[in-house]
Image (spheres, rainbow, N blue to C red):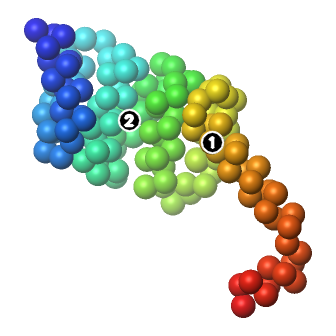
Amino acid sequence: DTLTQLAQAWLNIEIGGEKLQDAHYIFDDFKDKLTPSVLLLNNLAVCAIGQHKFEDDETQSYLRDGLDKEQNNYDLLVNYIFLAQQTDKNADAVVNRYLSLLKETCKNSELVEELAKKETEFDRLCQNYTFKEAQKITS
């Protein structure tokens, strides 16, 4: 029964829309019955984020509680960065802090590798233009 409920919740996340609330109820029930794992907390956060509950304190608490348990969890870090971009007035500081942690702990992840490529390409392009050339382009 538990495995079936878990599979149903993950399917509901994939379907999205109104099914996210159903998934949230399933995960919330597990949270009440069991000690919440990092994966369970992340799933609850994903449901809340998918429902655009960015300002909901519960959404952030799922991610914070998960990071308290496992500071270097890739999924939690990515979701926390996304949530900070949606809600935080000081998003740059939060994003930079968690992005640095992500770069340190998940060097081989697709996101970190792609970001490194983009940063390298941006630096290369910046070297091609002087300040006067940049002014001509923006004028």
Question: In the rendered image, is residue 29 in sight?
Answer: no
Q: CA distance from mark 2 to mark 1?
A: 29 Å
Return the residue nearer the eye: 71 or 61. 71
Q: The N terminus appears in which quarter of the rendering?
A: top left
The amino acid type found where label 1 is placed reads Glu
Residue at image coords 61%, 55%: 92
Residue at image coords 64%, 27%: 108
Q: Is residue 137 above or below residue 117?
A: below
Q: Please report contact status of discs 2 and 1: CB closer than 8 Å, yes or no.
A: no
Q: Earlier in the sequence, mark 2 or mark 1?
A: 2
| Residue hosting label 1 | 114
Q: Is residue 114 left or right of residue 26?
A: right
Q: Is residue 33 left or right of residue 69?
A: left
Residue at image coords 18%, 10%: 3
Q: Is residue 66 left or right of residue 18?
A: right
State how many labels appear.
2
| Residue hosting label 2 | 61
Residue at image coords 29%, 45%: 50
Q: Is residue 117 left or right of residue 8?
A: right
Q: Is residue 106 above or below residue 56?
A: above
| Residue 71 rendering spot, x and y as whole percentages | 55, 24
The amino acid type found where label 2 is placed reads Ser
Q: Is residue 70 above or below residue 62?
A: above
Question: In the rendered image, is residue 51 in sight?
Answer: yes
Could you say whether the residue bearing mark 2 is in a helix, strand or loop? Answer: helix
Return the residue nearer the eye: 73 or 135. 135
Neighbourhood count class around disc 1 (C-alpha, 10 Å): few under 14, some 14–19, many 20 upward: few
Q: The C terminus appears in which quarter of the rendering?
A: bottom right
| Residue 132 rendering spot, x and y as whole percentages | 87, 83
Could you say whether the residue bearing mark 1 is in a helix, strand or loop? Answer: helix
Q: Is residue 89 above or below residue 116?
A: below
| Residue 65 rendering spot, x and y as whole percentages | 42, 27
